[in-house]
Amino acid sequence: MKYKIFNEEKTEIKEVYFKLVYSDGADSNIISLVVCNAEGEELEEGCILDIDKNGGFYVVRGVNEDFGFELNKDGEIIIN
């Protein structure tokens, strides 16, 4: 999936690519939304959201600020 990120002034900041990743290890009940490059390779500090098998959504700490998302002090995406 490819998305464009805009600031409050509706100026495009950058394009960002996402993919869903199913965890097959100890956290096998988790699907993660991660930022990737155009070739689908995961980027460092690119996991932004975890979804558990019961439908719970959890923002992930330490997201890379260079992606252009609005983050709180813990590096979690701010969802409005």
Image (cartoon, grey):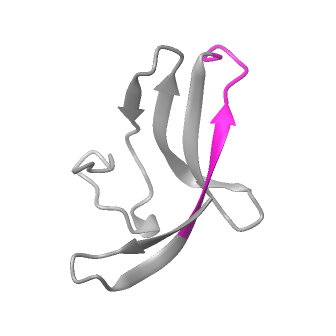
Residue at 33% x, 50% y is 77
Query: Magenta segment, which residues?
Result: 16-28
Q: Quadrant of residue 18?
A: bottom right
* 34 displayed left or right of 10: right
Image quadrant holding the N terminus, namely: bottom right
Residue at 39% x, 83% y is 12
Count of numbered labels shown in the rendering: 0
* Residue 58 drawn in magenta: no
Q: Give the vertical position of 54 relative to 41 (above or below).
A: above
Seen from the viewer's position, the closer of residues 10 and 23 is 10
* 67 displayed left or right of 40: left
* 15 displayed left or right of 1: left
Q: Give the vertical position of 35 relative to 49 (above or below).
A: below
* 3 displayed left or right of 24: left
Residue at 53% x, 74% y is 15
x and y percentages locating residue 24 in the rendered image: 73, 21
x and y percentages locating residue 64 in the rendered image: 44, 58
x and y percentages locating residue 20 in the rendered image: 63, 42
x and y percentages locating residue 10 in the rendered image: 29, 82
Residue at 70% x, 18% y is 25
